[in-house]
Image (spheres, grey):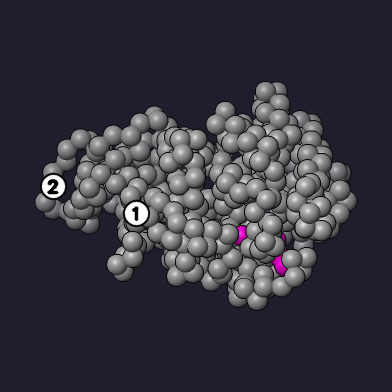
Amino acid sequence: MGMLIKNGNVVMVEDGKISKMDVLIDKGIIAEISPEINRNDVEVIDIEEKFLIPGLIDMHVHFRDPGYTHKEDIHSGSKAALAGGFTGVLMMPNTDPPPDNATVVYYWKEKSKNIPLNILFSGCITKGRAGKELSKLHELKEAGVVAITDDGNWVANGAVFRHAMEYAAALDLLVITHAEEPTIANRGVINEGYWSTVLGLRGIPKAAENVAIYRDIEIAKITGAKLHVAHLSTAEGVRLVAAAKKLGLKVTAEVTPYHLVLTDEALAGYDTNLKVNPPLREAEEQKALLKGLLEGVIDVIATDHAPHASYEKNVEFNDAPFGMEGLETAFPVLYTELVLTKKITLEKLLLKMTVNPAKILQLPKQGDIKKGNYANLTIIDPKLTLKVSEELLVGKSKNNPFLGKTLTGWPVMTIYQGIVAYQRLLKGVQ
Ligand code: DOR
Ligand code: ZN
């Protein structure tokens, strides 16, 4: 059965256009987009000028499965993704066991096969993410991973990383780098600067990130491999990525919603939910990240959804794990803080959350609202204002830094290949 979505403000991202259109879905595909379509043989929904956007694609999520399923698992993570308006996610490999060979990938495939979400897999660069010996990269590629990364760990050994990049170039695998040189980071817990001094917490210098990005780009240069820099947090990182792009290297980069809207000043209350790696930085760095995003140096916004149980976060700051959960709130956070304040247009924001990740991950027929594409669509209510509560967080963990904040522009329906995969029930909450 098909579906007709009437009277939406349809965002065609690549064209940079928002126009009032009707959209017809047939057999999971977008069959027609035009100012007026009338059909009585399919389900019709009138969305009354809400936004109809392409399903969001998140290149960086931690679903903790296998190994840490008390924090999240594939089912609960998918629920959080769909509630956040996402129709595609790339799972990170810091699981136990980690996917350094095909076995975990087969487990993931089996467990995710009936979930209405495009779940993509990344494999480890090195065995056990230990940075010493390469994973079975050929086997991982054959099993279906689209990227390799040791996320959480930077591959510090240059020879190992070069070797991995050579394989990646030959296998057409994207290499995602968690760029942090560990001896410079030196067990820091927040950004090194004014606030680490005031709070008496060990700092992570920006140099740790900058040095790592510089090394990785040099290796991209000699191997020709595709390098994607995860969760950029420094101005110098933006400059390095811009320079690499200018040279024509296949280098792309992402930033998280948190680094775009929060700074290290927020840590004044020692809230462990704000402890994240890379750490929140100063306003100056944040400005450079936003500028890089607007100018196209930063291609993607990815959540780095990193759920942790409250008993794990509810400890001394130094002992808490790094990470924030946030699939459910990513879009309203960005809409409220960046679009409504006119720092970025909705079309441009979506470019970073739909079209660009689809291109980088080479996902055909996804990422935009176009005839012939999969009907992966999200309806956003631009007037809906809700206070972030634990109830709104549908994943297993509640370590969201925006709890208690009032946000506008929530996803109210997520459609995956023509099927309603999520619908927000508004129990009289305003
Ligand atoms: O803060 C983070 N948490 N950064 C990472 O790179 C890993 C993530 C996690 O797995 O919790
Ligand atoms: Zn990371």
- Circle 2 — which element? loop
Which residue is more in the foreground, 334 or 8?
A: 334
Q: Main secondary structure of the magenta part?
A: loop
Quick check: is 102 in the magenta stretch?
no
Side of 67 where 9 appears, left or right: left
Residue type, numbered disc 1: Leu
Where does label 1 land, which residue?
384
- Circle 1 — which element? strand
Side of 36 where 382 appears, left or right: right
Magenta segment range? 320-324
Q: Looking at the image, is 365 positioned above or below residue 267? A: above
Side of 375 where 154 appears, left or right: right
Dot label at residue 39: 2
Q: Position of residue 182 (x, y in %)?
A: 84, 52
Quick one: label 1, few (<14), some, or many (20+) residues within 10 Å?
A: some
Farthest front residue? Answer: 198
Farthest left residue? Answer: 40
Q: Position of residue 34 (x, y in %)?
A: 22, 35
Quick one: label 2, few (<14), some, or many (20+) residues within 10 Å?
A: few
Q: Nearer the viewer, mark 1 or mark 2?
A: 1
Location of the N terminus (image quadrant): bottom left
Q: Quadrant of residue 429?
A: bottom left
